[in-house]
Amino acid sequence: MKTLLQRSLAILCLTCTTLFSDAQQVDLFKLQDSASAAEDKNKSERTLNTFYSTRLVTTQTVEITGKGSMDFRINHRFSPLNQGFYNLFGLDFVAARIGFDFGLSDNLMVGIGRTGTNKEGDAFLKYRVLRQQTGEKNVPVSISLLGALAYRGIRYADPTLNVKTKDRMYYTAQVMIARKFNENTSLQVSPTYTRYNRKLFLTGGSQDLFSIGFLARQKVSKKVSINAEYFVQTQRFDGTYNPLSIGVDIQTGGHVFQLHFTNSIGMNEHTFIHETFGSWGKGDIRWGFNISRIFNIGRKKK
Amino acid sequence: MKQIKVLAIIVTFLFIGQQAEAQKIFGTRNGRITFESPTDGDVKAVNNEVTSRIADNGQLTFSLLMKGFKFKLAEMQEHFNDQYAESTKFPRADFKGTIANLKEVNFSKDGSYKVSVKGDLTMHGVTKNVTVNGILEIKGGKPAARGSFVINLKDFKIDASSVTEKVDVEVSCQYQ
C-alpha cells in the first residue's frame, strides 16, 4: 500500500516537473491551436443563406431583407407558351408586379407591391421567430411568419354586384419552416391560410382556404441554384390548379435574377396560390422572371 | 513521514518551475482587424473580436472568426461569408509568426519599436507565408501592436475578382 502511494506520488512529481519545464517556454502557436479548438467547441453558429432571396419563385422564403436595406423587386409573368407563334409563345403579353421591400431589423421586414392584373395593391409583414443554428445551441430549423393583405382595385362594370371595399380585401397568414440540410440543399414547408371576404366570379372552393407549400432549392454552383415550389390546396375554386413553378436563381453581387416556368400568373399570395387557372398538363406554362436589386438606405454607421 | 518528504519535493519543484518561468506573455481577445478594397471603398469590414497573443520570445499569434467581420451592408456581409470566404467551411483565419528583428525590441522598456513579423497566414483553407511591417509600442510594460499589409485574394483561392482583387488589411491590438 505504502509503495503504491510512493510510486504514484513520484509519478505526480515527474509530471509536475515536465509540466513546469514546458511552462518555461510556452509555445504560443500550440496555445493558439488549443484555444481556438476549445472556443469552436463552445460556439453556436447561425445558418446563413438558407435561400438566396426572400422569394423562391413567387413564394416567400424564411429569409429577411437585411436591416437598413431596400429591395426593389420587379416580377414578370408572360402569357402561356402554348399560344403559339402568333403571340411569340406568350412573350407578347406580360403581367408585372413592382414592389419594394424594407428590412426593419435583423428579423423583421415589410413590403408593398402593385400588380397590374386586377389592379391589386398588396402589403406584407414578415417576422423571423427562429433561426437555424449549429454548435453548442442546436436549432434544427428556421421559422418565419407572414401576414399579407391585398386590395383588388379593378372597377366592376356591373353595378348590381354592389362591391364594397371589404369585398376587395384578401388576407393571408403563413408559417414558414425551413431547413438548410447542407451548403446546397434547402427545403421549406409553408402551411397557409387565406381568407376571401367575397368570391367574385369564382365558384366552388370556400372563402376560407387552407394550403401547404413545398419549396426546394438545390445549388448547382456557388452562384446558381435550381428551385421548385408547389402548393397543395385543401379546397380549390372551380377551374383552378395547384401552382407549380420551377426556376433558376443567378446571383451577381447585389442582384438576384430569377428565371422560371410556372403555371400561375398571380404574383401575390392569394392569386398565386388560389387563382391559378393554367395547367402544366395542358401546356399553360408561362415563362417569368424576377429581378431583385438591393439598395442600402440605412444610416451610415459611425 | 515519507509522504511529507515527497510533498516537500513537489513543492520545491513547483518553486523551481516558477522561478524558471521568465517568459512574458501578453494577450487580448478584442484586437481589431479591418480590411478595405483599394478600388471600392464600400467593400470594407471590421472585426473587433480578434484573439491575439505576443510573447517576449518573439512569437505572435492572431486568430479570428470570419463571421466576425462586420460590413455596413447586411447583404454584403452575407455574400462575403457565403460566396467568397465560405465561412461555414473555413470559419477561422489564423496567423502564427515571429518577430524577425527581436533583438531590437526590449519588452521591459517603454518605447516604440519598428518590427518586421514573418509567419504563416491561414485563411480559406490556404496557408501562405507573409511578412508584416508594423510598430510595437511598449507603454507601462504593456505592448500594443499596429501593422498593415496587402492580401492578394487569389493567393488564398478566394475568387472575388468581380468585387476586388486585393484588400488592404490593418491590424491594431492593445495587449494586457
Image (cartoon, coloured by chain):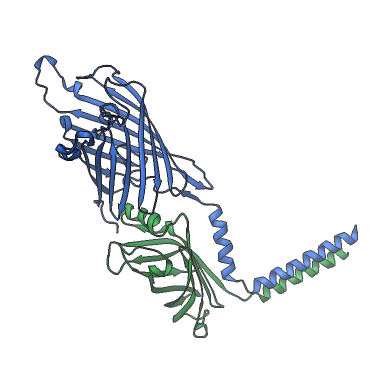
Of residues A144 and A286, the one nearer the viewer is A286
Percent x, y of residue A40: 53, 55
Quadrant, the C terminus of chain A? bottom left
In the visual, does B49 lie left or right of A127?
A: right
Percent x, y of residue A146: 33, 34
Q: Going by the picture, which residue comes out furthest to the top?
A: A160
Q: Is residue A110 above or below residue A4?
A: above
Percent x, y of residue A243: 31, 31
Q: Is residue A9 above or below residue A166?
A: below
Of residues A187 and A293, the one nearer the viewer is A187
Q: Is residue B125 above or below residue A217?
A: below
In the visual, does A3 lie left or right of B176?
A: right
Q: Residue at x 38, y 67 (%)?
A: B153
Give the total of numbered labels: 0
Q: Residue at x 35, y 53 (%)?
A: A223
Q: Residue at x 37, y 62 (%)?
A: B46
Quadrant, the N terminus of chain A? bottom right
Chain for colour blue: A
Percent x, y of residue A20: 69, 70
Of residues A233 and A35, the one nearer the viewer is A233
Q: Answer yes or no: is residue A66 visible.
A: no
Q: Going by the picture, which residue comes out furthest to the front?
A: A85
Q: Quadrant of residue A269?
A: top left
Q: Answer yes or no: is residue A278 visible.
A: yes
Q: Quadrant of residue A273?
A: top left
In the visual, does A83 lie left or right of B67?
A: left
Of residues A74 and B29, the one nearer the viewer is A74
Chain for colour green: B
Q: Is residue A265 above or below residue B162?
A: above
